[in-house]
Image (cartoon, rainbow, N blue to C red):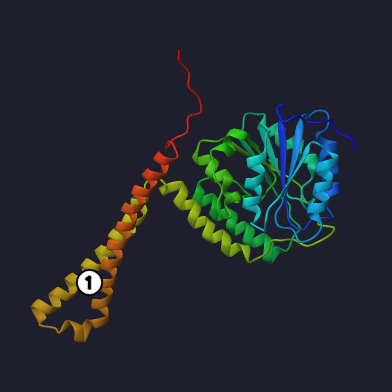
Amino acid sequence: MSAPAIHPAETVRYTIAIPLNNEEEHVVPLHARIVRIMSGRYEPFELIFVDDGSTDRTWNRLAELALLDRRVTAIKLRRNYGQTAALAAGFDHARGAIIITMDGDQQHDPGEIPLLIAKLEEGYDLVTGWRQVRSDNLVTRQWPSKVANWLMARLSGTELHDFGSTFKAYRREVLERIRLYGDLHRFIPALATSSGARIAEIPITISERDTGRSHYGLSRTIHVLFDLITIKFLLDYITRPLHFFGSIGLVSMLAAGLITGFLAVKKVFFGTHILDEHGPLTILGVVLFMAGVQLISTGLLGELMVRTYFESQGRRIYDVERVVGAR
């Protein structure tokens, strides 16, 4: 196999970043399919394969490819960190102005990469693939996915049909504004929207796996629900945590005040022995009051931490798209 060498200083237009975990059967044919599509029209390009703690011969295949094809960069993570971390590693090593991500199991058709690029060049900052027609299990995969996507769209305010698809094309500057943690790779469109990115969605085809097995299942739905809570907080309250914790704290303290008022009336006007007749209610009032104080205190601490974070990182609470002027 021969391929033109890419000098480290050479400008790379396109980067294809692919996370893999135990996909040794797919490495070589996937590489061949991508090279066939990208060669010529989309050069210079690079391929970044990230081995996310595979236990089979995936890394051996990748290392061999990197030696044979100078356009290939193989990255081996020390252990299985998950898809978000693997994608983050690919982003950190990418040199392209446009970065394309896809799965390593050949379910995504490299022949549709030009469709993503063409849509991106219409003026969008991020184009994501929509698995409009799916053939996987209806109960364990399709229904949970539909519910999760509906919730994501409602909570994030980003109108997409398919947040879970890894098949996406990004402009580099979009990813430079986003830091990935946990399993938040599926929420990149929502995080990008909060920074004013223009997003489009196009239907893609999904091929059946001919070997191996899927790494995803019903258990991931629980993780997605927790991620939804995280993303809702990040989108709406990252710069004002007191509004989140303080609101809950005030409601808690208001409930405690109502309970206390009720108990005071019973004691003053009816001579009721509060602890004997309303012991549990008294304890509930005390707990709600203390919880309210703690929640408001948490919100205040969060405000201090947010300010420390933005100032220490030299970050602003806004993103500028363009400045026009004499300077």
Circle 1 Cα neighbour tier, 10 Å, few/some/many (<14 / 14–19 / ≥20): some
At label 1, which amino acid type do we have?
A: Ile
Q: Position of residue 255 (x, y in %)?
A: 26, 66
Q: Name the residue located 83 percent from the left edge and 42 percent from the top edge.
A: 67
Q: Which quadrant: the C terminus?
A: top left
- Decide which of 326, 4 is in the foreground and name it: 4
Q: Which quadrant: the N terminus?
A: top right
- Decide which of 180, 112 is in the foreground and name it: 180
Q: Is residue 222 visible?
A: yes
Q: Position of residue 139 (x, y in %)?
A: 68, 66
* Residue found farthest to the right: 1
When asked about the image quadrant of residue 190, the answer is: top right
Relative to 191, residue 143 above or below: below
Q: Name the residue located 23 percent from the left edge and 77 percent from the top edge.
A: 282
* Residue found farthest to the bottom: 276
Q: Position of residue 286 (x, y in %)?
A: 25, 72
- Per the image, the residue denoted by label 1 is 259
Q: Is residue 198 left or right of residue 27?
A: left
Q: Name the residue located 57 percent from the left edge and 62 percent from the top edge.
A: 223
Q: Name the residue located 17 percent from the left edge and 75 percent from the top edge.
A: 263
Relative to 72, residue 296 above or below: below
